[in-house]
Amino acid sequence: MVGAIALDTGIGWIGGKILNKWKADEYVDFTFSLGLAVGGYIIADHFLHVSGVVTTLFTAMLIITKHKEISTGARKQFHKYWDCLGFITNSVCSSLLALLCLRWKKLKVSALHYSLL
């Protein structure tokens, strides 16, 4: 946990400083921030073997803290992206659950097994 917090502090602080100096449009801000979060996760999880989720969370919090001039366009991009990703994830999970229930019905599993699901 300490390693993840140390890594994300560095990534978030450097990323926020870069975004403050780099005056770009909202698409570049959004892409750079998303790249930092994904890159931090990969570095933490695969190379340093610390929590990638904690690293991503703290990186996002530090970018927001250090890069205070995120335009409203970039904020709207963030919200649209996460709303769309949440919708797709919920749709896939619901579809997989429905397929699982259909398969169980085909195998004639009892009602007790359905209740455990």
Image: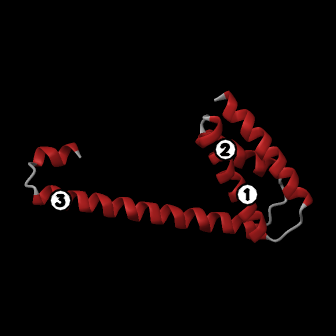
Q: Quadrant of residue 24?
A: bottom right
Query: Could you tell me which secondary element the residue under label 3 belongs to?
Result: helix
Q: Which one is in front in this view, the residue at disc 3 or the one at disc 2?
A: 2
Q: The disc labelled 1 sits on which kind of residue?
A: Ser
- Residue that label 2 marks: 43
Answer yes or no: do the residues labelled 1 and 3 have beta carbons within 8 Å? no
Residue 19 point in image, percent of width and height: 84, 58
Answer yes or no: do the residues labelled 3 and 2 have beta carbons within 8 Å? no
Residue 95 point in image, percent of width and height: 32, 64
Q: Residues within 10 Å of mark 1 (few under 14, many from 20)?
A: many
Q: The disc labelled 3 sits on which kind of residue?
A: Arg
Q: Nearer the viewer, residue 72 or 37?
A: 37
User: What residue is shown at x 29% (from left), y 57% (from top)?
Assistant: 97
- Residue that label 3 marks: 103
Q: Is residue 21 left or right of residue 35?
A: right
Dot placed on the residue nearer the N-terminal end, 3 or 2:
2
Dot placed on the residue nearer the N-terminal end, 2 or 1:
1
Residue 17 point in image, percent of width and height: 87, 51
- Residue that label 1 marks: 33
Q: Is residue 71 left or right of residue 96?
A: right
Q: Which one is in front in this view, the residue at disc 2 or the one at disc 1?
A: 2
User: What residue is shown at x 89% (from left), y 62% (from top)?
Assistant: 22
